[in-house]
Amino acid sequence: MTRPIRIGNCSGFYGDRISAAREMVDGGDIDVLCGDYLAELTMLILAKAQAKDPSVGYAKTFLTQVEDVLGSCLEKGIRIVANAGGLNPAGLADAIRAVAEKLGLDAKVAHVEGDDLRGSLSAITPEVVGKPVSANAYLGGWGIAQALAAGADVVVTGRVTDASLVVGPAAWWHGWEATNWDALAGAVVAGHVIECGPQATGGNYPFLDEITDRRYPGFPIAEVAADGSSVITKHDGTGGLVSVGTVTAQLLYEIADPAYLGPDCTTHFDTITLAQQGEHRVSISGVRGSPPPETLKVALNDAGGYRNTMTLVLTGLDIEAKAAHAEQLLFEVLGGRDRFAEVDVRLLRFDTPDAPSNERATAHLRVTVKDPDPRKVGRAFSNATMELALGGYAGFHTTTPPTAESAYGVYRPAAVPRSAVTQTVVLPDGERRTIADPPSAASPPVRVKPRSSEVSRAQGAVSRRVPLGAVCGARSGDKGGNANIGLWTRTDEAYGWLREFLTVDRARELLGPEAADLRIDVHQLPDLRALNVVVHGILGEGVASSTRPDPQAKGLGEYLRSRLVEVPIDLIPG
């Protein structure tokens, strides 16, 4: 087919807007309805569910959406593609067939499997110790492409990459070969932009003044052409904004090195060119690709133990002295810090001198304990905090009543040789096909070129102390135990200054004490006027285990934007 394929997203995570599927199907023309339901934390959640009931382990909300839109999709010829299968794509495929039968519909359902490595851990590096609750290789889009070519109306997968939900349909539609690196890379970029739903259409966007339609953002659509170039848009009449800025923000979300390694190709994010093509239409072109690595990424989740958190409120004067007194008394009551496997105590200061209201005179002492024994960190811990109610500091109260323990997981990144993984597509008629691996390469080429119109800033220019966010936007998130902060500017001149200003040492200084001893990388993406700051280890053993108040680092970028720095006055807007 010569025209671009229109792929609409209806989910950015397990628990996203349930009505988005119906809104996408009814809102205008699309060829494929896709949805991303999986994340590292989601796999842990699904593993817990499957441990209680082996017949599940998939995203149940997707099944609800399918029941709502399946009839309309069959009538309009819209294919449905989602990674909602989680740890049980075959079970989800059967559940969809049952829904179709209940509705009196003839739906051809296929699924992709082979990512679940729990039964074969020996080839994973580093060596797997113990028995993880989930172990999944990140597969690509070719199983999806073959299922669609075989006539599937619905394709569900386990742990494919988020972008594979666009790569697979685009490869099927345009008849790409496995070595069409640039086209595949272009589809990866389009998939990366729409995978998080309305984050590409004005959601979580730092420049609120640019968004004139403040209704809930419409979910994004990628129109992917035969050469891999694309246009990002949304249905007419929906809220939000599609601009170079909103697309840039999502491009910088949860990435690391500009050479973005994937199962189908390596995508070079420092080759992306964006342009505003019209209202709510942004074109993506120029993306270069190269062969993928010789290994596949693996996400491991272990049962980490149990945790509990109690937050004590401190008010008014002597905040630090009250916090120290409370901490000493609490662990005296508990029998010492050493009885727990891990203790995390944080004094969170929100208070201001001579506060105009009670709330603005408060700080929080947040105490988290972890241990393999749930009895230690359950009510025995939270009830102990209440012994301070009459024998502790003046003004004692807590944000919650005593709480129970909860299980947490530990995330570990790993790799596995491609030869140790067999990607299989199970077609609607039950035929099983093995998906061949594409040619791979040991390491991607390195490419960083200066932006042709980039302007270097002379030192000593007249400057003013303003928030960093006056000259750049930011989008931050988690990558396992690491956090990334993508920062971009709106002019070449501002990018030239930011590139010189935001060194590794400066980033460490601005991020404060928690980043003082951590490895930080700063990657340049000049074609996007952007830098990507990767802070290694700031999230510890991953989202499920992190004791940070912001465990997914969603607010880290906005914190960095709030820091006061010296900026040349001619770069400061208005």
Image: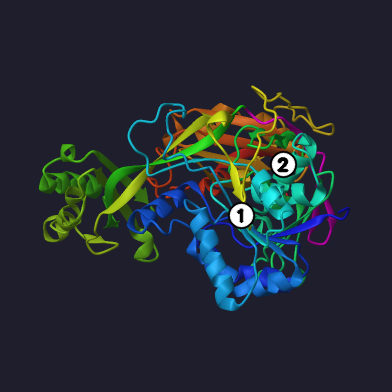
Name the secondary structure under disc 1. Answer: loop
* Foreground pick, 472 / 138: 138
Residue bearing the label numbered 2: 569
Which amino acid type is marked by label 2?
Ile
Q: Is residue 470 visible?
A: no
Determine the image quadrant of residue 277.
bottom right
Tell me the mark number nearer the camera, choosing from 1 and 2.
Answer: 1
In depth, the one of 519 and 410 nearer the eye is: 410
Q: Indicate the position of residue 33 as horizontal and vertical percent values.
A: 68, 62
**Residue 79: x %, y % from top left:** 70, 62
The mark nearer the N terminus, 1 or 2, is: 1
Say whether residue 134 is magenta.
no
Could you say where residue 197 lies in the image, as x and y percent from the top left?
Answer: 63, 58
Quadrant containing the N terminus is bottom right
Q: Quadrant of residue 206?
A: bottom right
According to the image, label 1 marks what residue? 196
Q: Are marks 1 and 2 in contact (CB under 8 Å)?
A: no
Amino acid carrying label 1: it is Cys
Where residue 93 appears, as percent x and y from the top left, is: 55, 60
Q: Residue reaching furthest top?
A: 442
